[in-house]
Image: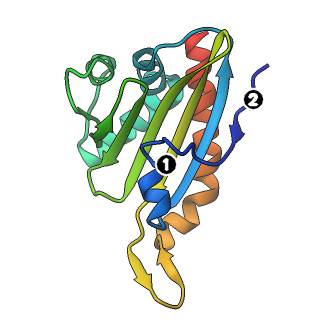
Amino acid sequence: MATVRKLELPEHALLQCYHLSGAYTDCYYIDSNKQVLQRDYVIAFYTTWLFRIERIILKWLASKPSSDEDARRLADSEQDAFAAWTTEARSEYQLLMCDFRGRTRSWFMSERNGDGTRLYFGSAVVPVTKSAANGPKIGKGFSLLLGFHKLYSRALLSAARSRLS
């Protein structure tokens, strides 16, 4: 059974610029024993049962509706927005999304790993303040939710891999 693991951001990750600027960043991965296209990974992630709950919440609380078809269009580069996010950068194997408030980023990457694929998911939280003495601060709300965020990120990545299997 595959396990979600945490690791340092790869040097070529589109999320790396936020890490280097002092933002909070994380990076998780899970291995799939089959070849997975980036588009299929993005579609699977955004259409898991778990993320559908987030989509319902975003629809009602933030007026940001989305559908499975929107996820497909995002993955196929036919549109640059999905629910509360817009595309900040993309390449053949990566996608970097920015939330509508500009505070968080979601990053996806698929990379061949032998006969399978390593699926990466990471996040960045842009600091709200910088002080010379204490460095960047992400804010109390994000700090309070950080433990949940880490568990949720792992659960989302695991659900996406399961959906691809």
- The disc, 2 or 1, on the residue closer to the chain's N-terminal end is 2
What amino acid is at disc 2? Answer: Thr
Q: Residue at x 34, y 18 (%)?
A: 68
Please tell me which residue lies in front, 160 or 32. 32
State which quarter of the image contains the N terminus. Answer: top right
The residue lying furthest to the bottom in this view is: 133
1, above or below 80, in the image: above
User: Which disc number belongs to residue 123?
Assistant: 1
Please tell me which residue lies in front, 58 or 138. 138
Neighbours of disc 1 within 10 Å: few (<14), some (14-19), many (20+): many
Circle 2 residue: 3
User: Which disc number belongs to residue 66?
Assistant: none
Q: Quadrant of residue 152?
A: top right
78, above or below 11, in the image: above
- CA gap between label 2 and label 1 equals 19 Å
Please tell me which residue lies in front, 20 or 1. 20
State which quarter of the image contains the C terminus. Answer: top right
Q: Residue at x 59, y 31 (%)?
A: 157
